[in-house]
Amino acid sequence: MFTSPLIAAPMAGGSTTTSLALAAQGAGAFVFAAGGYKTAEQLAAQIAPLRATGIDFGVNLFVPRNTALASGQAAALRRYAAMLGPTAERYGAVVPEVSLAWANPQGQDYWDEKVALLLAEPVPVVSFTFGLAPSRVVSALHNVGTRVVASVTSVAEALAAAQSGADALVVQHANAGGHTAAFLAGGEVYQGTLVDLITEVRAAVSLPLVGAGGISNARAAKEVLRAGAVAVAVGTALLRTDESGARAVHKDALADPRFTSTEVTRAFTGKPARALVNDFVRSYSATAPNAYPEVHFLTASLRAGAAATNDPQALNLWAGTGWKSAQEGPAAAVVRTLLAEL
Ligand SMILES: Cc1cc2nc3c(=O)[nH]c(=O)nc-3n(C[C@H](O)[C@H](O)[C@H](O)COP(=O)(O)O)c2cc1C
């Protein structure tokens, strides 16, 4: 299913551009278009040039939450919104009213429209994160010839994904940059290495596995392949490349010695995500409620304000633990260097 041992991981929010995907694919990686946050039309525009290459590729979607927030979380959201006020003001932004309307198209990340698009105009591979696609969606994708990939962070999630009909798994370690793929409530953060996690998942399910999270060089990638993964996926390693759509302020922060650590935080979106530790993470991590995508919408204008002034201190600077190794230059060079040694 994956035509390369190296996968350019999907990075929604602007980082995975068409040119990044095409450059990584041209250099020999299997690539995913990042469908998260996009409307169906925007996703179709990203798919078209990948389809035109005639080379297999994947599309990644966020699985939306299908329940309302518990009332306690709604109260926590309102408190959080009030706390964000002074920081928003500093960036000339206003925190919007707390919206609990999760069932609208935006709150559902345009799921219905994007699934309809992928059924009408099938692609070789579709991967999901933040949850498992319902079995009827998995079956419908299978019926149009699409292979389905689920993202998991534990053996329990891998077993549930196998049960859901997935054809392969992305096994994401907590060292990964950006949002966690974790979807089972109450799961502890895995304490072992990615190699340990791949080994444990491999013993529990017989599906092809992709290892992801904190891979910053070929040596680490090779260990993951040796543990039984059919491929490794890298995200952070591509963030600073010429074709990456990450903001310049984000790219610069990844190479700025003032940023000395990453942390998993809910502060920006309400869902745990690994980011460089900046003022916003220090101020808000302890109090941010567990409410995605509500918190994402609450902080959006504040983040836009910080971006407009190129201030890295209130931006979500997603980064995996291997961020210090991320290189600038053409994405093809990063891909070729990794592939040469695999
Ligand atoms: C900026 C950024 C955005 C991401 N967006 C997505 C996404 O849209 N969908 C997804 O499944 N994973 C997403 N991820 C996670 C990656 O797919 C992958 O699991 C992760 O980058 C691997 O760890 P690494 O960053 O240490 O290489 C994102 C990661 C980053 C750094």
Image: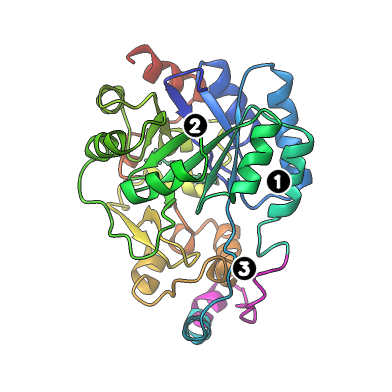
Q: Amino acid at mark 3?
A: Ser
Mark positioned earlier in the residue sequence (3 or 2): 2
Asked which secondary structure carries label 3, the reply is helix
Q: Is residue 126 above or below residue 129?
A: above
Viewer-nearest of labels 3 and 1? 1
Residue at 37 percent across and 12 percent down: it is 340
Disc 1 Cβ-to-ligand 1 distance below 8 Å:
no
Which residue is disc 1 drawn over?
A: 115
Label 3 Cα neighbours within 10 Å, binned few <14 / some 14-19 / many ≥20:
some
Q: Position of residue 143 (x, y in %)?
A: 69, 33
Q: To which residue does mark 2 refer?
A: 241
Q: Residues within 10 Å of mark 1 (few under 14, many from 20)?
A: some
First-in-chain label (3 vs 1): 1
Q: Which residue is mark 3?
A: 301
Which comes sooner in the sequence, label 2 or label 1? 1
Total residue callouts: 3
Camera-near label (2 vs 1) is 1
Residue placed most toward the observer, 265 or 240: 265
Q: How is the image coloured?
A: rainbow
Mark 2 surroundings within 10 Å by alpha-carbon count, few (fewer than 14), some (14 through 19), many (20 or more): many
Q: Magenta residues? A: 85-104
Image x and y of residue 150, in percent:
49, 42
Label 3, label 2: how far apart the Cα atoms are: 26 Å
The secondary structure that most of the magenta stretch takes on is loop
Q: Position of residue 188 (x, y in %)?
A: 28, 60
